[in-house]
Image (tube, rainbow, N blue to C red):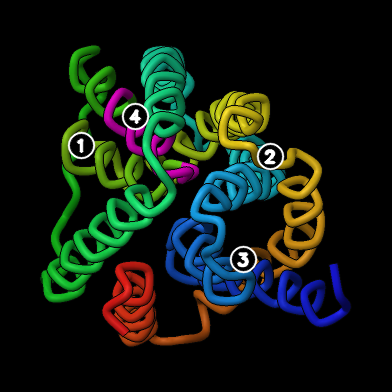
């Protein structure tokens, strides 16, 4: 790997970390388009290596974040069990199915997902502030559905899952935002390890190198961790709606690039 490629990897990690900490955007949604732009699309199976690298970075970012939320006492421990079991079960299914889809197909699916997320984000930006309703004991069914969908899509596309699980906990389970973020972080700190390990261990089915994926992750992880801390601090200093709108536009451009629109 050249010095320029190493520098690019450091930059991708930093940008993913800052934007993730700043506006809650999942790191993989920044990392995957970034890797394609910098390191290319050929062979198409390389997308699987990019997924493994992104999922490994998610582990590095999720673990310290989870510890902070736990210390702050914001994690709803009674929700973690059902969420974790359903997330892991469907995460495994998602990863195994992803191994049967070619890299270009996964790119298109990821582009469609990012575009859908951007539409949801615009809707959220336009919503007026409202008082959250708290469900003291969300039903097991809603937790299993939330975790299952999060795990499947996360495994299929190489996402950490927080970008899905937090809205599910808020909208479906009626858990307040702060507790949703903290509980999601606690779940993902474990499920991300499972997802990354499984994806790395099956890279040989795509004729991709585990060491290449790990080297990409090793370059991006330190700056992603530092960037996430910086982004979290900037959240309290910048107009969040404006920032979210700008990030949404950037993600739409990234989705268009993944889909080879430009």
Please tell me whether mark 4 or mark 1 is closer to you in this view: 4
Q: Nearer the viewer, residue 242 or 113?
A: 113
How far, Cα to Cα, is label 3 from label 1?
27 Å
Q: Residue 24 in the image: x percent, y percent?
A: 44, 61
Q: Residues within 10 Å of mark 2 (few under 14, many from 20)?
A: some
Q: Would you say residue 155 sits in the magenta stretch?
A: yes
Q: Residue 40 in the image: x percent, y percent?
A: 57, 70
Please tell me whether mark 2 or mark 4 is closer to you in this view: 4
Please state if 126 lies on the left or on the right of 236 as rendered.
Answer: left
Element at label 3? helix
In the picture, the disc for residue 63 is 2
Q: Are marks 4 and 1 in contact (CB under 8 Å)?
A: no
Q: Are marks 3 and 1 in contact (CB under 8 Å)?
A: no
Q: Nearer the viewer, residue 90 or 48?
A: 48
| Highlighted range, magenta | 148-160
Q: Are marks 3 and 4 in contact (CB under 8 Å)?
A: no
Please tell me whether mark 1 or mark 2 is closer to you in this view: 2
Q: Which residue is mark 4?
A: 152
Q: Earlier in the sequence, mark 3 or mark 4?
A: 3
Q: Earlier in the sequence, mark 2 or mark 3?
A: 3
């Amino acid at each position: 790997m050249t010095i320029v490629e190493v520098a690019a990897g450091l930059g991708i990690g930093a940008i993913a970390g800052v934007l993730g900490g700043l506006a809650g955007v999942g790191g993989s949604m920044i990392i995957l388009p970034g890797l394609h732009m910098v390191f290319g699309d050929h062979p198409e199976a390389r997308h699987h290596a990019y997924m493994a690298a992104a999922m490994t970075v998610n582990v590095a970012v999720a673990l310290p974040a989870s510890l902070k939320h736990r210390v702050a006492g914001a994690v709803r421990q009674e929700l973690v069990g059902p969420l974790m079991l359903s997330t892991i079960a469907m995460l495994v299914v998602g990863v195994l199915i992803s191994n049967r889809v070619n890299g270009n197909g996964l790119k298109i699916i990821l582009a469609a997902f990012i575009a859908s997320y951007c539409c949801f984000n615009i809707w959220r930006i336009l919503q007026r502030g409202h008082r959250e309703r708290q469900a003291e004991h969300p039903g097991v069914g809603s937790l299993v559905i939330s975790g299952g969908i999060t795990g499947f899509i996360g495994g299929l596309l190489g996402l950490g899952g927080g970008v899905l699980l937090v809205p599910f906990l808020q909208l479906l389970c009626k858990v307040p935002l702060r507790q949703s973020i903290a509980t999601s972080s606690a779940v993902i700190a474990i499920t991300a390890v499972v997802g990354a390990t499984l994806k790395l261990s099956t890279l040989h089915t795509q004729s991709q190198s585990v060491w290449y994926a790990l080297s990409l992750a090793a370059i991006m992880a330190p700056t992603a961790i530092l960037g996430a801390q910086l982004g979290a601090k900037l959240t309290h200093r910048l107009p969040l709606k404006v920032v979210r709108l700008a990030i949404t536009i950037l993600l739409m451009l990234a989705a268009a690039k993944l889909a080879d629109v430009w």
